[in-house]
């Protein structure tokens, strides 16, 4: 299967890569091919030290409508569904494992696994008219895999309400609940994404990579183990040239020279 056209890639001079889901007529539903293409694109970026940040966007009228239900219904076997959801889970984890921050640029709808993808991204910026739902329950399918990401972004009862009702929430409510960081009017969406990116790419890549890895590791640990991990990580971070320069610049009351 030729999966290249299912995810479009562009890169700017700052090292910001945009991966655009490209099934606009299907509201960017996650077919097997698109899952494979997005995972391959993420894996390729993981080893590229020139990349400073990644934006995941959707072509057409929506960010992502979740799994392709027509494709799923065409092969109703337990083995197939197990392989499909495992494949999608590995792709979602590739977002978290990427050493640079990943921003979801959300417009239109982000439903079911599309909402999961927003939750798995490190940051999210949404158009004010964007809508979010984990709506599998509406067709008799509890959004179990999206619940893993959703429950790590929202308060427990807020996440569970979305999961058991299948109802939509708007962008402002999604921001209030912790699913997205920033909301902008549709015509200002790209500018808001760019403003967030500008803050990120101004920081040392090494520190961001080390910090992102630690951030997710410590979340899964007890507090004492989390502190031990964080202490060791900060000590290593302090030995990085960028940190030594940054601290010295602060002492000298001058901007750091991270070039």
Image (tube, rainbow, N blue to C red):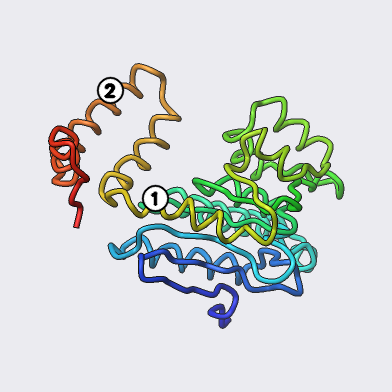
Front position in the image: 131 or 162: 131
Looking at the rendered structure, the secondary structure element under dot 2 is helix
Q: Which residue is mark 2?
A: 228
Residue 152, position in %: x, y? 57, 34
Mark 2, other Cα within 10 Å: few <14 / some 14–19 / many ≥20? few
**Residue appearing at x 76%, y 37% in the figure:** 163
Residue 196, position in %: x, y? 48, 50
Mark 1, other Cα within 10 Å: few <14 / some 14–19 / many ≥20? some
Q: Is residue 40 left or right of residue 188?
A: left
Q: Which mark is residue 166?
A: none
Looking at the rendered structure, the secondary structure element under dot 1 is helix
Residue 143, position in %: x, y? 72, 44
Mark count: 2
Q: In the displayed structure, would residue 182 be above or below residue 161? A: below
Check the image and name the residue furthest to the top: 224
**Residue appearing at x 59%, y 35% in the figure:** 153
**Residue appearing at x 55%, y 59% in the figure:** 191
Q: Is residue 127 left or right of residue 43?
A: right
The quadrant where residue 110 appears: bottom right
Quarter of the N terminus within the rendering: bottom right
Q: In the displayed structure, would residue 5 be above or below residue 83? A: below
Q: Which residue is mark 1?
A: 200
**Residue appearing at x 66%, y 70% in the figure:** 59
């Amino acid at each position: 299967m030729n999966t290249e056209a299912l995810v479009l890639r562009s890169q700017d001079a700052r090292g910001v890569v945009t991966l655009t889901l490209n099934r606009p007529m299907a509201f960017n539903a996650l077919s097997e091919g698109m899952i494979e293409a997005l995972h391959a694109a993420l894996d390729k970026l993981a080893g590229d030290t020139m990349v400073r940040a990644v934006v995941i966007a959707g072509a057409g009228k929506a960010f992502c409508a979740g799994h392709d239900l027509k494709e799923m219904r065409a092969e109703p076997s337990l083995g197939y569904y197990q392989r499909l959801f495992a494949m999608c889970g590995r792709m979602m984890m590739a977002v978290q494992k990427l050493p640079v921050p990943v921003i979801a640029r959300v417009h239109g709808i982000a439903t079911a696994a599309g909402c999961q993808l927003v939750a798995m991204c490190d940051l999210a910026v949404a158009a004010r008219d964007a809508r979010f739902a984990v709506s599998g329950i509406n067709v008799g399918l509890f959004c179990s895999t999206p619940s893993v990401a959703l429950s790590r972004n929202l308060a427990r009862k807020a996440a569970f309400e979305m999961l058991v009702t299948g109802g939509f929430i708007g962008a402002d409510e999604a921001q209030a609940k912790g699913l997205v960081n920033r909301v902008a009017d549709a015509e200002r969406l790209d500018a808001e994404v760019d403003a967030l990116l500008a803050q990120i790419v101004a920081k040392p890549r090494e520190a961001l990579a080390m910090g992102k890895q630690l951030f997710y590791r410590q979340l899964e640990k007890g507090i004492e183990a989390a502190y031990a991990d964080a202490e060791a990580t900060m000590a290593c971070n302090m030995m990085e040239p960028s940190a030594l320069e940054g601290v010295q610049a602060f002492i000298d009351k001058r901007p750091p020279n991270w070039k």
